[in-house]
Amino acid sequence: MAKIQKNEYSFKVIGHIRSDFPEKFGIPRQSGRVPSLGSTVIFEPEYRNPDALRELDGFSHIWILWVFSESVTDKPPMTVRPPRLGGNRQVGVFASRSPFRPNPIGISAVKLEEIVCTEKYGQVLRISGADMMDGTPIIDIKPYLPSADLIENAVGGYADGVNDHRLNVKFICEIPDSLAPDRRISLSGILADDPRPSYQNASDRVYTMDFAGHSVGFRVDGDDLYVVRIEKI
């Protein structure tokens, strides 16, 4: 007898991300793009059991499956326009990493820096290289297996070479002491990756993003990005 297939499944949220991004603008487009960018996984009370993390500390990297909670839609498109392709080229939703999907699930490979026991949240995961907004719901965590997950000679289709370009970041404003040194390093990496959609290239426009409790203003002229303002929020 053939097994009956369900058309819908429900998943439990096992935790949330705590990051320096209160909104989507400025978040790295993929995990690993800014290796210095730190964040924390905090588990829901039901999953604050040390047994659930037993031997996870032996892995250097983990996969995180999460929800595009700000992009849920009842009618996801079948084609999308990737911003890094200028917003003019359509590709199939399943040939993209667009957040607007039939099931708004994201997947990120991140470095597991350490597992820390806290009084308030129990064991939490300190990670780096994530690409998630603060509060992002997490639905699963799996260890990264170099023997299985690293595929030699893989081909990236239209995305090959798209994300290779980096901007020269120049701070032409005073950096407040309230922005910690490690956050400054991460901010430089985020800006070098050019947070703007590729179809926005006006050199006189000042863009604003919130990061680590600060409002950051910048403009881009050619290959140079100028940070013109950093203010504590």
Image (tube, rainbow, N blue to C red):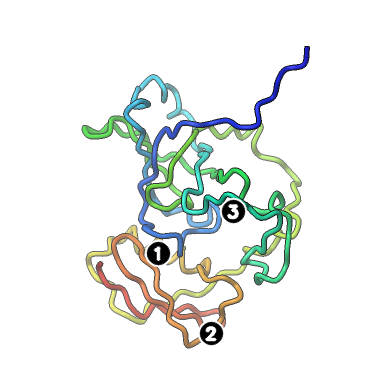
Q: CA distance from mark 3 to mark 2?
A: 27 Å
The answer to the question of whether label 1 and label 2 lie on touching residues, with beta carbons closer than 8 A, is: no
For badge 2, the amino acid type reads Ala
Residue carrying label 2: 202
| Front label number (3 vs 1) | 3
Instruction: Give me the residue at 70% from left, 40% from top.
Output: 151
| Front label number (1 vs 2) | 2
What element does badge 3 sit on? loop
Position of the C terminus by quadrant: bottom left
Report x, y in % for residue 130. 47, 49
Q: CA distance from mark 1 to mark 2?
A: 21 Å
Instruction: Give me the residue at 53% from left, 31% from top.
Output: 10
Mark 1 Cα shell of 10 Å, populated few (<14), some (14-19), many (≥20): many
Mark 3 / mark 2, whichever is N-terminal: 3
Q: Quadrant of residue 47?
A: top left
What element does badge 2 sit on? loop
Mark 1 / mark 2, whichever is N-terminal: 1
Mark 3 / mark 1, whichever is N-terminal: 3
| Front label number (3 vs 2) | 3
Residue carrying label 3: 100
